[in-house]
Every structure is written in structure tokens, then in C-alpha cells.
Amino acid sequence: MDTGTGLAGRIAERRAGAGGPRALVGELRRALVLVPVAGGGLWTAESGGVRWVCAFTDEEAFARFAAARGEAGRSWEFAQVRGARLLDEVVPALGAPAGVAVNVADGDGSMLFPPVVGIVPDAVAVDAAGRG
């Protein structure tokens, strides 16, 4: 099963200054990503007043994340989730500004999908006030 190799490629394109942001968001929406599970829910981290759902394009990216945390030997549970579900269902359910952080342990291959119009539903986008 493809767990997002297309997404990793789109991230690399965008980081190199090629490809459009809409294509990148579309690729995340189509991709199956791996999300760590902890305490009965999907693992998140808070930074800058935003709750980030940490997602990974493949098991190798996930392993680099675990190693960076000093937890490479730990047995991690994770879920495969469609990116669209993260953006359309999980982010709004968090009840606070939230986005998706992909491959956070990969300095050259990471990408943030912040809680803004065009990425998350307008009802939970931090920049949606006054639109209309």
C-alpha cells in the first residue's frame, strides 16, 4: 500500500521552489499517512499556539522521528489515515487551532499545513474571520 511517497515528492518539489501550494495540499488530502497513537488518540504536539497532528509519509520517516526523540527502541503504535480525514475531521475535532506537520524529523523533507483557509475547513481556519 502506498503510504504517501507522492506526498514526499510534492514536499521536495515545493521546498525546491517548484510546484504549487494547491497541488501540495491536494497530495496531502489523497495520501495515506502514518500517525502515532498515544493515550487512545492520535499523537499531537503544541508549538506556537497551534496543536499539530504529526504525520509521516512512510515508516522510514516515522523511524527517524522516533530516533530523534531518543525512542527508537520503543514499540510505537500508529494509524494509517487519509490526509483529507486529518484536515476535515481530526483538525476540527481538536477544538483549538490545529494543523498537520508532516515528517517533522526531516529538516529537508518536513512540511507544515497550518490552520488557514484553503488547508483546513473555514470554520476552524485562524484567518477566516472577515471573509465573505
Image (cartoon, rainbow, N blue to C red):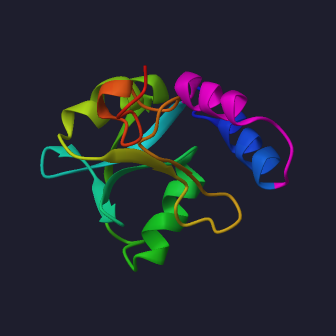
The residue sitting at the bottom extreme is: 70
Given residues 12 and 17, the one toward you in this image is: 17
For image coordinates 30% across by 33% down, the residue present is: 124
In this orientation, does residue 9 appear?
yes
For image coordinates 30% across by 26% down, the residue present is: 123
5 within the magenta span = no
Is 40 on the left or on the right of 5, as rendered? left
Is 113 on the left or on the right of 131, as rendered? right
Q: Where is residue 107 in the image (x, y as percent from the top left)?
A: 64, 69
Given residues 128 and 12, the one toward you in this image is: 128
The residue sitting at the left extreme is: 39
Is 53 on the left or on the right of 10, as rendered? left
Residues shaded magenta: 16-31
Given residues 85 and 39, the one toward you in this image is: 85
Considering the image in quadrants, where does the N terminus appear?
A: top right
For image coordinates 67% across by 29% down, the residue present is: 22
Q: Where is residue 50 in the image (x, y as percent from the top left)?
A: 33, 56
